[in-house]
Amino acid sequence: MSQPNSFAARKARAAEQRTVSAARDAINGKTKGIRALLPFIGPAFIASIAYVDPGNFATNIQSGASFGYKMLWVVVLANLMAMLLQNMSGKLGIATGKSLPEICREYMSPWLTMVMWVVSELAAMATDLAEFLGATLALNLLAGIPMFYAVIITGVVTYLILLMEKYGFRPLEKFIAAFAILIGLCYIVETLLSKPNFGQIAYHSVVPWLGNKESILLAVGVIGATVMPHAIYLHSSLTQRRIIPRNDMEKIKIQKYSTMEILIAMAIAGFVNLAMMYMAASVFHTSGNSDIADLTTAYHTLTPLLGSAAASVFLISLLASGISSSVVGTMAGQVIMQGFVGFTIPVWVRRLVTMLPSVIIVALGVDPTMTLVISQVILSIVLPFPIIALIYFTQKKELMGVLTNKRITTILSSLFAVIILGLNVWLVVQTLI
């Protein structure tokens, strides 16, 4: 039994070495174009899965069904935020060789580090809850598997995928990238089937609109579902030791390729989020089904409106999203714990513990979609913590060296932090009064 495993491990290490070697060729100018970019593809695609998790399905579909195309601008804004922040996170790992949680533990006071850790763990739990419930619901609707058994299957499948990590970074990167592409293809099909109004999409993608308390609650949820705290932490870990720069020039070149990958991966994620919302606007809102309040109703309503094929594609994308994002969420949880407090627990223990809230919610019969939306609001409230830490550290010359933030980067990221904080304050005030 150990011999095949040993062979697989050697094969994986050889593939990893080929990737590093190809990256060195690109850095040294021996390869150009897409061949030069390919060995750097991976970290941003893993992080991008967090931006198309089941929480996005819940908030985007509710927003589109309730308000039509009017909230597409929130998706565009959130995706621009995500591109900038993920680029800063990846850059931190390249510049320092450390993850954001590790940097926080090194430079922050112990009490603040503990506060950051507790808040970040809460965010990771909220994330995992959304991802687990999404995959569970998809299995239930697609295959008729009872919810309780579906949640167990989701846990086992994600754990088996996580075992790929022991064979190096490349197999898991390829697997997650394939899931991201699959979700994108599903929404190309949904776009063709739903026939949205492209004029309305273009207009409302750039013209801001905020209506009532419900729309702002959903806007906060959309931002919380799109710009993910755990993805910001994780990205810095994915780049910190992948291709290790040997000098400042290599740092600059690796960062250039990292930025290109982020733009591609996040553009795919952005398209999927837009497609979720404009599909709901086109199919549900315009047909008078503006009260679509959960993913189950969305699935059952899609069948008579667009046919069983559209409904099945919707569930396939939800299942792929739930499983892959749950894998990414567990990876992020390990990075958060190891970085902030310096220890790890076995993956199977973390997988078991993070399953429990989903199992309890399923057992109690709580509405999964409402739980998804609330989890995304929690994420949006937690989000300022990693953003502020990221802005603070990436503008420090003594830490970042040649990759220190340009002034415009610090200004834009600070503006995004203010917008998120402002929306959150408004939400709290409206909830209390």
Image (cartoon, rainbow, N blue to C red):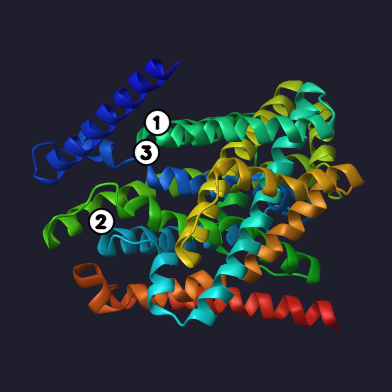
Q: Which residue is label 1 attached to?
A: 171
Q: Which residue is label 2 attached to?
A: 255
The amino acid on which the numbered mark 3 sits, given as a three-letter code, is Phe
In the rendered structure, the answer to whether residue 114 lies left or right of residue 99 reads: right
Question: Which picture quadrant has residue 391?
Answer: bottom left
The amino acid on which the numbered mark 1 sits, given as a three-letter code, is Pro
For mark 2, give the secondary structure. helix
In the rendered structure, the answer to whether residue 264 lies left or right of residue 76 reads: left
Question: Which picture quadrant has residue 205?
Answer: bottom right
Q: Quadrant of the N terminus?
A: top left
Disc number lying in front (2 or 3):
3
Q: How far apart are marks 1 and 2 (CA)?
A: 22 Å
Q: Distance between the residues labelled 2 and 3?
A: 18 Å
Position of residue 292 relative to residue 154, above or below, is below
Disc sitting over residue 12 in the figure: none
- Residue at the image point whose x is 48% and y is 66% from the top: 340
- Residue at the image point whose x is 39% and y is 16% from the top: 4
The amino acid on which the numbered mark 2 sits, given as a three-letter code, is Gln
Classify 10 Å Cα crowding around label 3: few (below 14), some (14-19), many (20 and above).
some
Q: How far apart are marks 3 and 1 (CA)?
A: 6 Å
